[in-house]
Image (spheres, grey):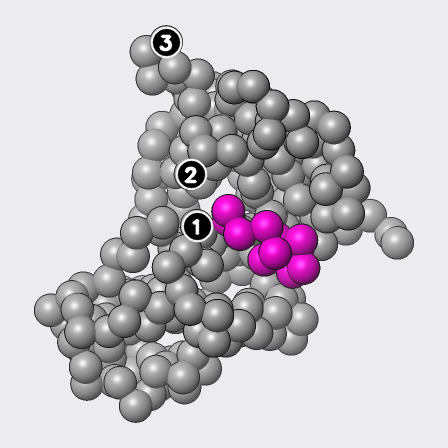
Amino acid sequence: MADAEIALDIQNLKKYFGGIKAVDGCTFQVPKGQISGLIGPNGSGKTTTFNLLTGVLAADSGEVLYNGENIVGLRPYEVFNRGISRTFQITRIYREMTVFENMLSASSMKMPLREARSRAEHLMEFVTLTKLRGEYGGNLSYGQQKLLEFARALMTDPDLILLDEPAAGVNRTLLNNLLDHIHHLQEDQGKTILIVEHDMNVIMNHCEKVFVLDYGVKIAEGLPEDIQANEDVIEAYFGHR
């Protein structure tokens, strides 16, 4: 298989909190137009890496190249405006807004209201939330909230989507629904998707490439089947920590 184009080029990224090296010289390249996974034991630096990629945290050093531009140092809205969107470990929907209002609130300020309404309707149908359009976000099940946050992340039609633990707390039916949508975005629209996830079934069955972090350092990358057999990965998960 020919080498894929690179969507995101992460070089020697570092973030320390006092003496804690949360991300310590992390380097990897996310292939364009593929679904990739970022895994590692608890505390390995996965979510911190996502926060660095999206400007939620400022990196101490290193580069993140996206479309040839180093986006380290950009604010979250600036990263967002360049075509990168994300979800969070704990959903960040508006509990006192309806599903439809939640969708509209995620649109770009530059998007005309009529276009935003149309896109919101389309995405609610895409994630099967149309029947709940008038329901308050706080009344949704946790799985439905995950679907809503996922749909909100698509309102600006991003090219790169970062999903932080999409399977956590979601029942199997809704998870399969979400995974179908993720594959549709990648296969039919050419989106690049990077998933942080503890559910190894999701990673091994749905990702084309997997990166593994431990103590803020990338210790392995490769095909899912290679990662499963990698001794360093096995040691990180099951060895003495």
Residue 61 shown left or right of residue 19 in the figure: right
Asked if the stretch drawn in magenta spans residue 199, the answer is yes
Q: Secondary structure at mark 3?
A: loop
Residue 153, picture quadrant: bottom left
In the rendered structure, which disc, 1 or 2, sits on the residue that comes first in sequence?
2
For mark 1, give the secondary structure. Answer: strand
Q: Position of residue 79 (x, y in %)?
A: 40, 46
Q: CA distance from mark 1 to mark 3?
A: 25 Å
Give yes or no for residue 24 being in the magenta stretch. Answer: no
Q: Which residue is mark 3?
A: 19
* Residue 89 seen: yes
Q: Is residue 177 above or below residue 230?
A: below
Three-letter code, disc 2: Thr
The residue tagged 2 is 47
Asked whether residue 189 is in view, the answer is no
**Amino acid tagged 3:** Gly
Q: Decide: is 124 above or below 205.
A: below
Q: To which residue does mark 1 refer?
A: 164
Point out the image quarter for the N terminus: bottom right
Left or right of 123: which side holds 176? right
User: Is disc 1 in contact with disc 3, using a CB cutoff of under 8 Å?
Assistant: no
Q: Name the residue type under label 1.
A: Asp
CA gap between label 1 and label 2 equals 7 Å
Are discs 1 and 2 less than 8 Å apart at CB? Answer: yes
Report the front residue among 200 and 95.
200
Give me the residue at 87% from left, 52% from top. Answer: 2
Name the residue furthest left: 96
Residue 94: x and y, percent?
18, 64
Count the marks: how many? 3
